[in-house]
Image (cartoon, rainbow, N blue to C red):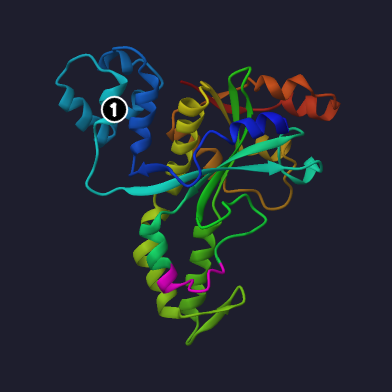
């Protein structure tokens, strides 16, 4: 996307104020909320691509409360468990003139949606691990939030507002991977050790991961993709969303060497009812001049969903 379009979108979310609540399997309710535009029945939903979501316990609970009457999108916002996580959403930009190093599918910039921890995580985190705010589980070269927030995960998106299309370029997480590595080091060491230049206390790192971070580890990918879909549909009005397959993403983004986790480009989009397609986002075809890129697009496979 072009820089001017990106700057316009960056004004969508008030800084540090947009909360996003998540609990296990909330994505099913979110998708049904977005998919049900008019009154419908359970039988009619069973004939759509969202039929598999009806088997989720939280969806069954919602349907039971409706007692057989016609369903609306609002019905799928009524369920709320006793325990849930609060995150903050922020926006950022990714890209430069040297686009080949940015792992984007075309020249230009990506919009970044960041999923950030709340104080419920940050306060015990600072006490146990990070009193000096050296952010040992972040990479400054990645598109994480600037300022006081700590980024759990992010998604990168290429967007065409005129066409009403978006391509999710990646969903990624540094924090949990690095924290789990630090925990493994803590288990092996007999005394305090240095990690990213600062001394860490073994027992505190282990306690942080096991008592604070595990609950986020279990849901981060669901939460990140849910927040991305919510933002694209509710804030930008985009109804046609594409998602890279593992092979096509590596090819178009020119990723060599170690590839990202396959599950993020197979299991995750399928869980969210994305369907495999040979269709290509229109904006990728528009300005393609390279014969090699054209060939890659002809062989491309994406996942897509329309809401």
Q: Is residue 130 magenta?
A: yes
In the picture, the quarter occupied by the N terminus is: top right
Between 83 and 55, the one nearer to me in the picture: 83
Question: Which residue lies at the image location 74% right of the left edge and 48% below the top edge?
Answer: 256
In the image, is 26 to the left or to the right of 13?
left
Q: Can residue 216 be spotted in the picture? A: yes
Between 246 and 235, the one nearer to me in the picture: 235
Circle 1 sits on which residue? 76
Q: Is residue 133 above or below residue 110?
A: below
Tag 1 secondary structure: helix
Q: Position of residue 29 (x, y in %)?
A: 33, 31
In the image, is 110 to the left or to the right of 70?
right
* Dot 1 alpha-carbon crowd within 10 angstroms: few under 14, some 14 to 19, many 20 or more: many
In the image, is 298 to the left or to the right of 225?
right
Give the residues drawn in magenta, as a range: 126-134
Q: Is residue 173 magenta?
A: no
């Amino acid at each position: 996307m072009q820089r001017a379009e990106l700057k316009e979108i960056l004004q969508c979310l008030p800084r540090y104020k947009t909360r996003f609540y998540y609990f296990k399997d909330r994505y099913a309710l979110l998708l049904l909320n977005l998919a049900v535009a008019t009154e419908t029945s359970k039988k009619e939903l069973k004939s759509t691509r969202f039929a598999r979501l009806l088997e989720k316990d939280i969806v069954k609970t919602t349907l039971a409360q409706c007692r057989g009457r016609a369903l609306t999108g609002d019905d799928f916002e009524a369920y709320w468990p006793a325990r849930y996580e609060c995150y903050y959403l922020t926006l950022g930009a990714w890209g430069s003139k040297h686009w080949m190093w940015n792992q984007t599918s075309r020249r230009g910039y990506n919009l970044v949606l960041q999923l950030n921890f709340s104080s419920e995580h940050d306060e015990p985190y600072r006490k146990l691990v990070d009193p000096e705010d050296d952010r040992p589980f972040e990479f400054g070269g990645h598109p994480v939030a600037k300022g006081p927030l700590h980024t759990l995960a992010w998604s990168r998106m290429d967007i065409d507002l005129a066409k009403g299309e978006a391509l999710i370029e990646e969903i990624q997480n540094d924090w949990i991977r690095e924290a789990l590595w630090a925990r493994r080091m803590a288990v092996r060491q007999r005394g305090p050790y240095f990690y990213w230049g600062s001394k860490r206390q073994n027992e505190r790192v282990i306690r942080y991961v096991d008592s604070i971070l595990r609950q986020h580890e279990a849901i981060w990918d669901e939460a990140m993709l849910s927040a991305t879909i919510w933002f694209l549909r509710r804030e930008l009005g985009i109804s046609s969303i594409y998602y890279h397959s593992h092979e096509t993403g590596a090819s178009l983004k020119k990723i060599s060497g170690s590839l990202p986790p396959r599950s993020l480009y197979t299991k995750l989009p399928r869980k969210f009812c994305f369907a495999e397609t040979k269709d290509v986002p229109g904006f990728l075809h528009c300005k393609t001049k390279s014969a090699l890129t054209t060939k890659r697009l002809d062989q491309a496979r994406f996942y897509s969903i329309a809401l």
